[in-house]
Image: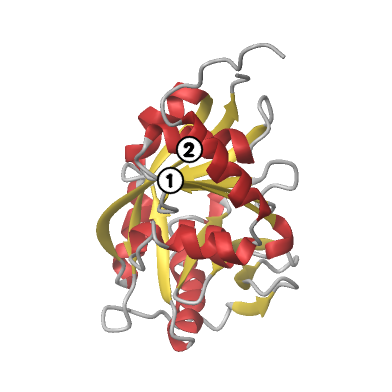
Amino acid sequence: MGERPAQPANRGIFRQAEVVARDQPLAMQRVLARQLLTSTPADALCWNFALEHDPQRTRLHVSTDSNGRPLAFVAACQTGLDLFRPLVVMRGEDAAALREALYATLTPGRRYLFSVQPSIRPILAEQCDLDDEQLGAIYTLSASNFQPVVNILVQTSNTPDGMLRAAIRARDGSVVAEAGTSWISTRYAEVFVRVVESMRGRGLGKSVVSAVCDHLLKSGRTPLYIVAQDNHPSVGLAERLGFRATGAHELSGVLSVRPT
């Protein structure tokens, strides 16, 4: 047997941690990942997918130090957002630990959706090809700031997977304005809105978003709205309903890990 090749600094520690993490049930890995998250809006999306998403559709790897302290994690989740590209979320400022978690969780060359804190981007760019990047500002809505809109044309419903939908239809039955939730956690829910271009500027988007937010606030959840700051019509819609900027941002796009 030949000599074992020299390992980079911390490589042995992370390899040991990888074996431990691989053998741990998802619930135990989530306990470790929880230590790298807060309950603030800045971590709401990551919290939902890393800690609360369907266990059967979640792959999570936590890199730890020699004492078992979590340093970074990467979660890949199958979602309804894209049937062919899982959504990837992550946390951790330790470059070596995050790199370890990336290669333990993701398949090199495969394309994934991603959503991360902007501070992670430099580490991510060292290991991944990044495309379609968008920086979104995170807005939240409190019950005290909510300025509801009542529109009898709005029809609300629930999707089979428990998401909320609110729509306004034209006389021919086609949807001209729709809002809903992209995901719902125990504390938060992200709201989206779509309006047919020819029907914009009539307050329809505000009406459907209001209906969704009303349901969320009554359920005890805080609505989140993530939007590019240069999308002035969308920002204006949110602010007129009472949304306020948190100062936090989320970077999203498409990534593929480079082969080692």
Nearest the camera: 100 or 88?
Answer: 100
Report the disc number at residue 13. Answer: 2
Q: Amino acid at mark 2?
A: Ile
Q: Quadrant of the C terminus?
A: top right
Q: Residue 256's spot in the image, x, y percent? A: 60, 28
Q: Tell me where residue 25 sits by quadrant.
A: bottom right
Q: Are marks 2 and 1 in contact (CB under 8 Å)?
A: yes
* Total residue callouts: 2
Q: Is residue 138 above or below residue 114?
A: below
**Vertical position of residue 11 compared to residue 226: above or below:** above
Question: Which residue in the structure is indicated by mark 1?
Answer: 66
Q: Amino acid at mark 1?
A: Ser
Q: Is residue 177 above or below residue 158?
A: above
Q: Give the number of the disc on residue 52.
A: none
Which element type, helix, strand or loop, lies under badge 2?
A: helix
Say few, some or many: other residues with alpha carbon within 10 Å of mark 1 (under 14 / 14 to 19 / 20 or more).
few
Residue 80 seen in this snapshot: no
Asked whether 246 or 73 is in front, the reply is 73
Query: Which quadrant holds residue 220?
Result: bottom left
30 relative position to 81: left or right: left
Which residue sits furthest bottom?
218
Q: Quadrant of residue 34?
A: bottom left
Query: Where residue 91 sits in the image (x, y, percent)?
Result: 42, 48
Q: Quadrant of the N terminus?
A: top right
Judged from this view, the residue extending furthest toward the top is 2
